[in-house]
Image: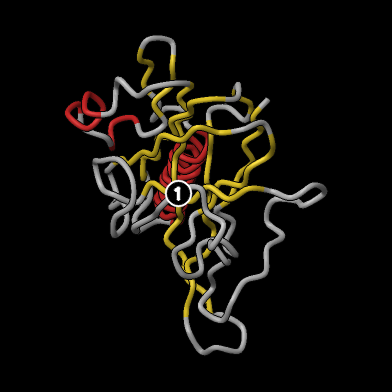
Amino acid sequence: MTTRSRGWTIATLVAAVAVLATSIVWSVGSAASGGSTALSQGGRVWLGGDRTSAGQRAAAADLPGAVVDLAAVDMGGRRMMGGTGGWMDDRMLLRSDRQDVPAGVVSLRLTNIGGVDHELVVLPLADGQQIGGRAVNEDGEVDESDSLGEASLMDGPGAGDGIAPGSTGWVTLDLAPGSYELVCNLPGHYPAGMYTLLVVR
């Protein structure tokens, strides 16, 4: 192989790697932001997009009250938990299509667009308390004794064993004005970043 043809081969490989890296970054960014994976339905955005079947969307389509769509996103990484010798998932997000809703009946619909099971737990925030600041136990979980409800049943309402990748779960609550922290409280998920704010006015 000549020096010139070797140079073209290397340049072609570099270009192919750059295209592949760009497409991976674009895909992950779109999934995390609800971008290209989002579907519009009646003016609302489905954060699960093509990872959620039409049957799952139809089953949850007529939820009562103000509907908040959330997406559970994980990048599949893992890291050692400090002091416990266990592992926790890393780089996780809980995305919401809105942060403000009127007081009263609110339906929270979680679509898992990640690669591991997730859930949604609704916790009230005390005055001055910030999201992401709860104490985490040795299992990587927060105290949820004051939970108002959860969505952890796959393709159904209420509590269950967790929402598998590509599935949806939801919970409907009557929420008073105030601030709430929406969290995934499976082991290691909260400290990995799975929380978001909901303000009820």
**Which residue is at 68% across, 56% downward?**
132
Locate residue 38 relative to residue 127 in the image: left or right: left
Locate residue 53 relative to residue 46 in the image: left or right: left
Residue 137, horizontal then vertical, whole percent: 59, 77
Q: Name the element at disc 1.
A: strand
**Which residue is at 38% across, 22% downward?**
64
Question: Which residue ends up furthest to the right in the rendered image?
Answer: 128
Residue 82, horizontal then vertical, whole percent: 61, 83
Locate residue 87 relative to residue 135 in the image: left or right: left
Question: Which residue ends up furthest to the top in the rendered image?
Answer: 42
Residue 181, horizontal then vertical, whole percent: 61, 47
Q: In which quarter of the image is the C terminus?
A: top right
Residue 74, horizontal then vertical, whole percent: 45, 53
Locate residue 154 relative to residue 196 in the image: left or right: left
Q: How crowded is mark 1: few (under 14 residues within 10 Å), some or many (20 or more)?
A: many
Question: Is 190 situated above or below 168?
Answer: below
Residue 4 visible in rendering: no
Which of the 4 image quarters holds residue 133? Answer: bottom right
Residue on which disc 1 sits: 120
User: What's the image's color scheme?
Assistant: secondary structure
**Which residue is at 46% across, 43% downward?**
28
- Badge 1 amino acid: Leu
